[in-house]
Image (cartoon, grey):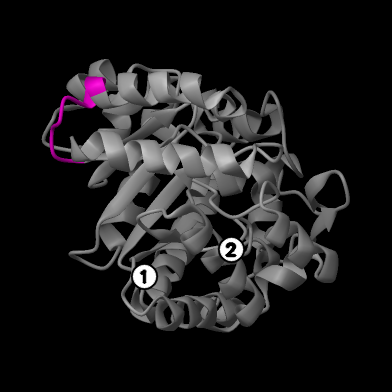
Amino acid sequence: MRQAGRFLPEYRAMRARYGFLELCKNPEAAAEVTLQPIDRLGVDAAILFADILLLVEPLGVGLEFAKGEGPVIHRPVRGAVDVARLQPVDVDSAVPFVFETVRTVVRALGGRVPLIGFADAPFTVASYVVEGGASRDYVHTKRLMYEEPEAWHRLLSVLTDATARYLNGQIAAGAVAVQVFDSWVGTLSPADYRTFVLPHVAALIKAITPGVPVIHFGTGTATLLPLMREAGGNVIGLDWRVELDTAWASIGHDVAVQGNLDPVVLMAKPSYIRQRVADILRRAGGRPGHIFNLGHGVLPDTPVDHVKALVDMVHEMSSK
């Protein structure tokens, strides 16, 4: 969960040299950022460093990363006419730098740990494209879903097709598993998820190269977990708003789970972190198929030594 990032001083040094999109589009630099946490933290897998919106830029909606504001879409998609104007995405020519980053990372890892690829799920990408950036209420997104469902489904179909080719390109380049990251899907009710999202996520996961494990994650999804399981994935990610044992039982122990420490716990003293780690491992019950992880990404002000301590704690307690 966002191993690389602003909590690492070596990442901040890279950002002082590169703009954000510039960093994402430079395979050597992006590979370096991907690799930074491996030796520093001792994690069990590398996670590809690439922005969630790289597939948005070739749509022609005017993506910009504004300083202090995050991603801004200058030509948001608000109706059927806007959807019809979207440019087709030739993934191979649009993001070749991502696939080269994967190849560079795999060579550098030399088999020490596997590389996990990732992409944002169609709903979350669509929410940025429709809202014009981040949102609290997703008014424009939901209005499009409710008032122009045909346009919504066309938009999701475009994103689903591009995302499937994007993930399969990462797999072809050397990623051994992929994560579908639905950051904002928790804004939806179960009924809306089933109608407007589930068919597209199911199509996406079905289109991923057979035999490659898929981690399906979202935040704020306590009421959506059974539907996410229905949509697919070998692993269902859990955020910190649910108890791991209860959530796992609700979706069935025949699927793996990932999670689910609150990232803010890493701001606390190591003695308290240890208590929370022990509780999560107790709830996992020693069953096969639990990937210990945070319930979302590492926060920017997190002490690096606390993240390292967490990894060491999990290794130590899991071995017992």
Left or right for 141, reference 205: right
Measured along the vertical axis of the image, is residue 80 above or below residue 212?
Answer: above
Left or right for 283, reference 240: left
Tags 1 and 2 in contact by the CB under 8 Å rule? no
Residue at point 25% right, 15% down? 246
The one of 310 and 167 positioned closer to us in this rendering:
310
SS at circle 2: loop
**Picture disc at residue 50:** 2
Q: Give the range drawn in magenta.
A: 282-289
Residue 298 image point, x, y percent: 58, 40
Residue 285 colored in magenta in the image: yes
Residue 291 image point, x, y percent: 29, 41
Q: Which kind of residue does numbered mark 1 sit on?
A: Ala
SS at circle 1: loop
Measured along the vertical axis of the image, is residue 97 above or below residue 11?
Answer: below
Residue 255 image point, x, y percent: 17, 38
The answer to whether residue 116 shows anywhere in this view is yes
| Pointer 1 residue | 175
Residue 287 colored in magenta in the image: yes
